[in-house]
Amino acid sequence: MKERNLDVIKGILHEAVRKAGFEVDKDHLHVEKTRDAQFGDFSTNVAMLLSGRAGRRPLHVAEEIAGQIDSKIFAKVEMANPGFINLWLEQKFYTEQAELWLDDFDKYLKESFALSEKRKAVIDYSHPNIAKPMGVHHLLSTVIGDSVKKIYQRYGWEVISDNFIGDMGTQFGKLMAAIKKWGNMDDIEKDPIPALQKLYVQFHIEADKDVELDDEGRAEYKKFEEGDKESRKLWKKIVQWSLLDMQQIYDRLGVSFDHMNGESFYEDKMKSILDDGRKKGVIVNGDGGSWIIMPDEPEDVPVLVRKSDGATLYATRDLARIKYWEDEWSPNLMLNVVDVAQSFYFNQLFFAQRKLGLTAARNVHIAFGRMQFADSKMSTRTGNILLLTDLLDESEKRALELINEKGVDLSEEERRELARIMGIGSIKYNILHQARTTNITFDWNRMLTFEGNSAPYLMYTIARAKSVLRKADLKPKDCRKYDLKLDLEIEKKLMIQLMMYPDTIRRAAEEFKPNHVANYLYELAQDFNSFYNGNSILQAESKELKKSRLMLTALVIQIMSDGFKLLGLEVPEKM
């Protein structure tokens, strides 16, 4: 079996380090593409990493390591101040890698990420509340979570997605009270979600005038929790209406879940956790008969797990969710894609689960910033919310206008399909190419353009590449036996960027950051467009050169298509 991608280089360097009398964890041995071709194809700073431990000059360490490198894949090895080892690869190595990619890319990546043991993750993302329309504030969790899931699946993990829907809480008591006071079931059933939203807003407007309304809402929810048949029947209807509404949006976004276990799923799973915590002495009495988990540090806030009236909380149901995930799937990793405002909550939740001993899995809060709009703050309570369906409609409309402005040579049906792909893709890519740890800026002008770091630019690039192969009457796999001739700097630069794809996936997975994949694709698109605009492919100077450039084009199509899948984007056939 031929070795794959940068792992080959890392393996050779790791052996050279050992022979030179040093030790380094292979995972800490970094190989990067060089920014300037005069310094080689790839470079490593391993000598600088080791020099501090050995008390030696980095350049001397680099010389000793380089002296132990014995491999036919390198055309040249040089040292550079202050201690870099620069590497030039033989063209034959690139050709062998390209052949492997085009022959069976799934197998290539699987063997690149060959894990020592099976790994499993469970991920929660999106988690909308029932009885409320999905707003743009649900979009970030949905899009980021779906991409993280796809990246981990590509990384070789088994991934289970479980959408923890909000279908319990006092807000449902308020909604039920509103339905009983002002609602008409025949009218509600015609268009349930907007009608329920209107009633929910009306309740809060009236409650501002009459404080006793809040008590009525709490009383309604208490009846529901105690199993009142009428309340349960109404609640089930609300859940069914909501799930149908959510599914339409998920279908439109191309997002799916393995499970959608809402808070109510854990109603009968909380008591055992609370009882066990009491027996262990982890859960103790708090103020007014509440139950709490005391912090390790006196200045920290206790974790409330049961209210003084005996009611459970969101955190109680979240603890039950963690235990269920452990009992059902025994994952190595539990991922929670929720905005940064909930960081304190997750710190408390993870602390509580550790105290209760619910799982040995690593629990991670994948935090993200808010989406920035010029509009005022969005709030479900006041009704001032930008609906997700409206945002998707607007994006598709603007995409169609852009397509018509460009005079794209497509039929009306093809234009509308392209507008759908571009509209949805632009929203997703706009989120994913930005660092999730900062606020996400929403700007139509930057999202829907054929220039710059945007989905239409990437889509145009891959459509252009596919057009080249289509004119040559070839599919990417047909190019797998060609030889690469990387005589031009731009050809070498393009191939080196292609080589970085598996490492990009690895980094995106380890850091839970899809923007690494997005920005990798943008760099690749820039390199391909520079190559395409400056060099003839189908009319190359020789048959061998034509085949080489077709092979490069096929590789770009293959890797960009794969990267699109990780971001949840569709690939247009023509533009």
Image (cartoon, helix red, strand yellow):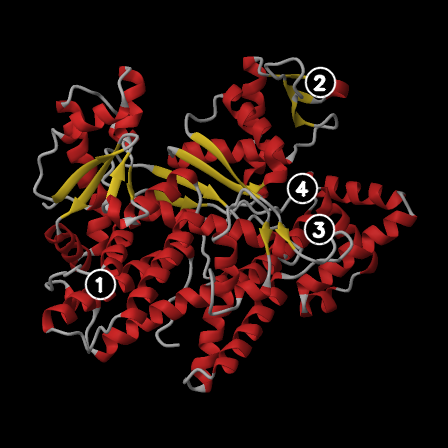
- Pointer 4 with pointer 1, Cβ within 8 A: no
Q: Is residue 362 above or below residue 464?
A: above
Query: Circle 2 sits in a helix, a strand or a loop, which is it?
Result: loop
* Sequence-first tag of 1 and 3: 3
- Left or right: residue 246 versus residue 529 is right
The residue under label 4 is: 227
Name the spot of residue 6 as percent of width and height, x first.
22, 43
| Among numbered discs 1 and 2, the one appearing first in the sequence | 2
Residue 248 visible in the current orientation: no
Q: Position of residue 96 (x, y in %)?
A: 12, 53
Q: Residue at x 45, y 56 (%)?
A: 256
In contact (CB < 8 Å): disc 2 and disc 3: no
- Residue position for label 1: 552
- Tally the marks: 4
Whether 67 is drawn above or below 23: the answer is below
State how far apart marks 2 and 3 are (Cα): 34 Å
- Badge 4 or badge 2: first in the primary sequence: 4
Foreground disc of the pair 4, 1: 1
**Res 325 seen here:** yes
Tell me if mark 4 has few (under 14), some (14-19) or many (20+) residues whose alpha carbon lies within 10 angstroms of its own: few
Q: Which image quadrant: the N terminus?
A: top left
In the drawing, what numbered circle is on residue 215? none
Few, some or many residues within 10 Å of mark 3 (<14, 14–19, 20+): few
Precedes in sequence: disc 2 or disc 3: 3
CA–CA distance between discs 1 and 2?
66 Å
Q: Are marks 3 and 4 in contact (CB under 8 Å)?
A: no
User: Circle 2 sits on which residue?
Assistant: 286
Q: Which residue is mark 3?
A: 230
- Residue located farthest toward the right when viewing the structure as drawn: 209
Image quadrant in which the C terminus is located: bottom left
Q: Inspect the image, locate mark 4, and give the three-letter code of the amino acid beneath it.
A: Gly
Residue type pointed to by label 2: Gly
